[in-house]
Image (cartoon, rainbow, N blue to C red):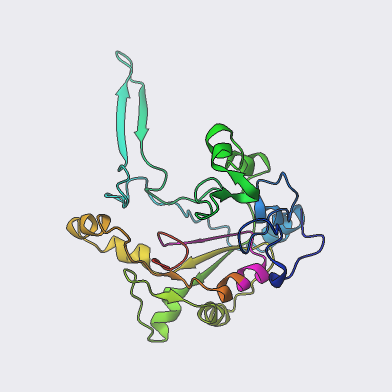
Amino acid sequence: MPFSKKPAFDDLPLDKTGPPGNAWGLFGPDDQCGMLNLLTPDRTRAAASEIRDGVRISTDWPLDRITTPAFNRIPFAQTISNIAPTSVNDDILHFNTQSSSQWDGLRHFGYQEQRLYFNGRTLDDILTTKINGIHTWVETGGIIGRGVLLDYVAWAEANHVPVKPFTSQSITVTDLEKVAQAQGTELKPGDILFIRAGWGRGYAQLSQDEISAMAIIPTPPAIGIESSEATLRWLWEKEFAAVASDTPSFEAWPC
C-alpha cells in the first residue's frame, strides 16, 4: 500500500513510545514488510515499461565467495551425497546466511538499547514465532520493482576521489546526488537503490592470508554510506522501497 499521507522526517518517531526515528505503524500495527509496501502494482508496471535490452543481472555472490567470514561465523560447506546405487545426487549445504550476499530481514538486528525489533516486536516474539520473517515478503509477491544503481566507484575514479574499501570511508548524500547527476539517473519513490561502493571489488583482490587476517578483527573497518541524520532524512524523503550495497553493512563501519 502507498502512503495515505507521508509523515515528514521531523515527525519521526511515529511510535512515540518506541526508539528514536522509528516509523512503526506507518502501514498499520500488524505490518511486517515496511517500505516494501511501496512496491505497488502501478510501480511494478511502470518499472517493467522501462526495460529496453532485457539483460538479466544477478546480484548474488557465490555462497562460498567469503572464504573466512567475520565474527566467527561458519564458512560455507557443501556435501554431495550420492544415493547409491543410482546416479542421483543430493546436495547438503551448511552455511551462515551472513556469509555471502544477503538482505537483512526485520528479525536480524534490533534496537540494541531497547531490545526491540520492527513494529515493536520483542526478542521473545522473534525466538518463538515467525513474525517479521522474510516469508512475508514472498507471500506478498516478492521484491520486484525499479532497481537503480548508483556507481560510486566509477564516479569517484572519474573525479580523482580515492576509494578506500577497508577503511570507514563515508559516502555522503552529496556524493550520491553527484553520482546520480553524473549518470543522468532519476530517483523515484518506490525505487530499490543499489550502491556500488567498491568493497566487493577490493575483497576480490585480497589474498587468503589477508582475508583471514581481516576476519579476526573485532570490528573490521569498511566503506559505506555516512551514518548521519542527513542520510536518514535523504533515505526517508526519497521513499526507497529497499536499499542494498556491495559492503558488509550499508553504512560505513564502524559508525
User: Going by the picture, which residue comes out furthest to the bottom?
Assistant: 159
- Which of 25 and 152 lies nearest the eye of the viewer? 25
- Which of 58 and 4 lies nearest the eye of the viewer? 4
User: Going by the picture, which residue comes out furthest to the top?
Assistant: 85
Does the magenta segment cover residue 245?
A: yes
Task: Name the residue: 72% across, 68% down.
Answer: 11
Q: Position of residue 86 (x, y in %)?
A: 33, 15
User: Going by the picture, which residue comes out furthest to the right?
Assistant: 4
Displayed quadrant of residue 43: bottom right
Q: Position of residue 22 (x, y in %)?
A: 64, 60
Q: Position of residue 129 (x, y in %)?
A: 59, 33
Relative vertical location of residue 164 with respect to residue 244 in this rendering, above or below: below
Task: Name the residue: 75% across, 49% down.
Answer: 28
Task: Name the residue: 26% across, 59% down.
Answer: 217
Magenta part of the chain: 233-247
Relative vertical location of residue 21 with respect to residue 176 in this rendering, above or below: above
Q: Position of residue 29 (x, y in %)?
A: 73, 47
- Side of 222 relative to 107 (left or right): left
Q: Quadrant of the C terminus?
A: bottom left
Relative vertical location of residue 73 with respect to residue 49 in this rendering, above or below: above
- Which of 200 and 45 lies nearest the eye of the viewer? 200
